[in-house]
Image (cartoon, rainbow, N blue to C red):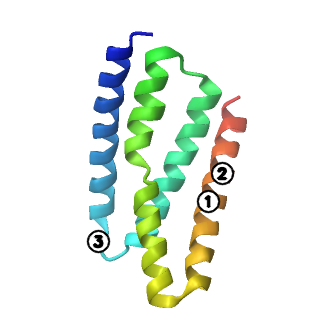
């Protein structure tokens, strides 16, 4: 695999994914928690689908590391969990973290099984 091409495709893909995420989050600006959950859950489902289809080489770099890496966001989740922790306490923050992780893993597995 050409390392320069891989870096450029990952950069292009992550830019596209990030633009899509920002656009979706802007559709309902008063619902940041719900929208970020939707983005991360749908990204997990798409990752499961792509993993079942086994993209190879530069396609995998572009789609998985690039587009879906830019589309989903752990940093956004961390900021939201911290905001919940400082605003409402550890219970709601940890519940939100568990819900997001559980939903993402479940959708990844389900999409992969359905596509196989």
Q: Foreground: 80 or 48?
A: 80
Q: Are marks 1 and 2 in contact (CB under 8 Å)?
A: yes
Give the residue pinned by disc 2. Answer: 105
Q: CA distance from mark 3 to mark 1?
A: 22 Å
Residue at point 66%, 51% (across, down): 105
Residue under the image location 55 percent in, 78 percent down: 93
Q: Which residue is mark 1?
A: 101
Q: Quadrant of residue 91?
A: bottom right
Q: What residue is shown at x 50% (from left), y 89% (from top)?
A: 88
Residue 99 in the image: state x and y as whole percent.
Answer: 62, 67
Residue 28: numbered disc: none
Circle nearer the viewer, 2 or 3: 2
Circle 3 Cα neighbour tier, 10 Å, few/some/many (<14 / 14–19 / ≥20): few
Q: Earlier in the sequence, mark 2 or mark 3?
A: 3
Spatial separation of the CA atoms under disc 2 and disc 3: 26 Å
Q: Which residue is mark 3?
A: 29
- Badge 3 or badge 1: first in the primary sequence: 3
Q: Nearer the viewer, mark 3 or mark 1?
A: 1
Position of 88 relative to 5 (above/below)? below
Vertical position of residue 102 compared to residue 13: above or below: below
Quarter of the view holding residue 31 = bottom left
Which is nearer the eye, 57 or 25? 57
Marks 1 and 2, how far apart at CA = 6 Å
């Amino acid at each position: 695999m050409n390392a320069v091409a891989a870096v450029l495709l990952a950069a292009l893909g992550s830019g596209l994914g990030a633009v899509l995420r920002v656009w979706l989050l802007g559709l309902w600006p008063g619902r940041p928690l719900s929208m970020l959950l939707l983005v991360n859950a749908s990204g997990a489902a798409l990752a499961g689908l792509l993993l079942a289809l086994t993209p190879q080489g530069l396609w995998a770099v572009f789609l998985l590391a690039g587009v879906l890496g830019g589309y989903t966001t752990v940093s956004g989740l961390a900021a939201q969990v911290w905001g919940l922790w400082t605003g409402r306490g550890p219970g709601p923050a940890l519940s939100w973290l568990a819900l997001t992780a559980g939903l993402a893993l479940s959708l990844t597995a389900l999409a992969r099984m359905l596509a196989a």
